[in-house]
Image (cartoon, rainbow, N blue to C red):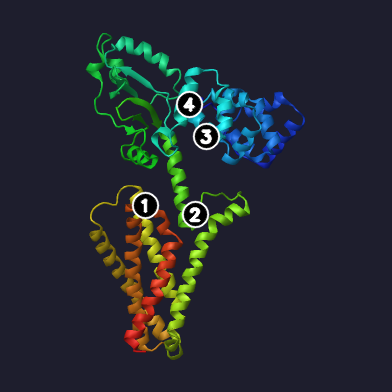
Amino acid sequence: MSEDREHIQFELTDELIAQVEQLIEDQNNKELRKLLKEFHYADIAEILDELDLEEAIYIIKLLDSETTSDVLMELDEDNREKVLKNLSAKEIAEEIEELDTDDAADILAELSEERQQEVISNIEDEEHKAEITELLAYDEDTAGGLMAKELVKVYATWTVAGCLRRIRGQAENVTRVHSIYVVDKQEKLIGRLSLKDLITAKSDQKIADIYIKNVDYVHVQEDVEEVAKVMQKYDLEAIPVVDDNQILLGRITIDDIVDVIREEADKDYQLAAGISQDVEADDTIFELTKARLPWLLIGMFGGLGAATIISGFQTAMEKYTILLSFVPLIQATAGNVGVQSSAIVVQGLANDTVKGKIVRRLFKEFLLGLVNGVGIAMIVLPISHFFFGTPYLVSITICVALITVIVIAALVGTFIPIFLDKRGIDPAVATGPFITTSNDIFGILIYFLIAKMILGF
């Protein structure tokens, strides 16, 4: 990807879109190029996302290959897919040759296998072609699927003077040099080289004498979420990728990890909201329905379950009708407490801060639920007794049930995400309708069981 260029402060306005559309209609390529040259490639991508497909294709073919390749990477995925369908294999290959190998592989991965082979066959740089093909073989959710082949590596046997000469050549293909990696004759990663140590060392010194042996790295088959955790924990801008034999294969940079973190956050947010698939607002009604309906059905069956429990205590309802007035309070409180507890645990699991014995965490959550429950009950007791005119014993029943429900909801909200995580299931599902629905049912059941024990119906 090209270096960032100087550009004006960008603001996408209707006037700007109208100006671009008018220049396209007039086929005033000179003025259109002049206008777009003022913007960063990410800004141009934002403009293209607002244009019709034909207009976007017009601009794509008007820009130089280096800018076009960067713009393609910034386009909305759906729009990029449409643009790629309207470009020839040769045109796509020309853009891909301007990209780093990881970005090139990402674009190719969006194409069908037949189309991939057609594009690859049109890539003239044989080394670039081989590296992209290698990356396509890795699963997209692994370090191999995320890494780039471009990096700067030196051999331990080189002298400082020889190392500097060779680094200049390697650096031409690397957008940003985050690290210099040291390998042995077998290409095995053995350390890293500080740029400061390199430029301050004597020219005849061996790299073996000045390199740093401690180096963080990840395995090529490592899950991308684990890679993100390592880079976050050690505050790394880049991390090398190795195979089973410790041979250096590539590197992963922080910009790719930010994308992973954002995608994971989006997925977790959707799961927490009860959306089972990765969808966007512009997707079709069918796709949106398919993503939302499963959790809505779970909520529906949960509601039917709660209704069944209530109908089972019909006799109590006839004698203590006031109990029904507090059902929404019990359900809402149970759901909110469960979501709060599970959200904290899920966040901790994502950041790898949930450690230690589960019993200790559950005990802490029990105490927290108890304190919160007593606090809320102390507010509800006088309100239910004086404002609603509820008999004192019934008010006590409501408060005892409320405390119990809060404690149980807190324990359930803590236990389920940890349980799911240990079973290899994304714990984010626990923060959505799953927790809310289960706690609604448990809350209603506990509420009426405690009422039955205290009031004796």
Question: What's the residue type where badge 1 is placed?
Answer: Gln
Q: Position of residue 449 (x, y in %)?
A: 35, 81
Question: What's the residue type where badge 3 is placed?
Answer: Ala
Q: Earlier in the sequence, mark 3 or mark 1?
A: 3
Check disc 2 and report the residue beneath it.
Answer: 276
Is 81 positioned to the left or the right of 235 in the image? right
Question: What's the residue type where badge 2 is placed?
Answer: Ser
Image marks 2 and 4: residues in contact by CB distance under 8 Å: no
Q: Position of residue 187 (x, y in %)?
A: 32, 20
Residue 228 visible in the shown view? yes
Report the Cα–Cα distance between label 2 and label 3: 23 Å
Residue sitting nearer the eye, 343 or 235: 343
Residue 454: numbered disc: none
Q: Position of residue 21 (x, y in %)?
A: 72, 35
* Badge 1 element: helix
* Badge 3 element: helix
Q: Earlier in the sequence, mark 4 or mark 3?
A: 3
Question: What's the residue type where badge 4 is placed?
Answer: Ile
Q: Earlier in the sequence, mark 2 or mark 4?
A: 4
Quadrant of residue 291 in the image? bottom right
- Residue for point 38% across, 15% down: 167
Report the Cα–Cα distance between label 1 and label 4: 35 Å
Give the crowd class for mark 3: few <14, some 14-19, many >=20 residues within 10 Å: some
* Badge 4 element: helix
Q: Position of residue 258 (x, y in %)?
A: 43, 39
Check disc 4 and report the residue beneath it.
Answer: 132
Q: Earlier in the sequence, mark 1 or mark 4?
A: 4
Q: Earlier in the sequence, mark 1 or mark 2?
A: 2
Report the Cα–Cα distance between label 2 and label 4: 32 Å
Check disc 1 and report the residue beneath it.
Answer: 347
Is 222 positioned to the left or the right of 314 in the image? left
Check disc 3 and report the residue beneath it.
Answer: 109
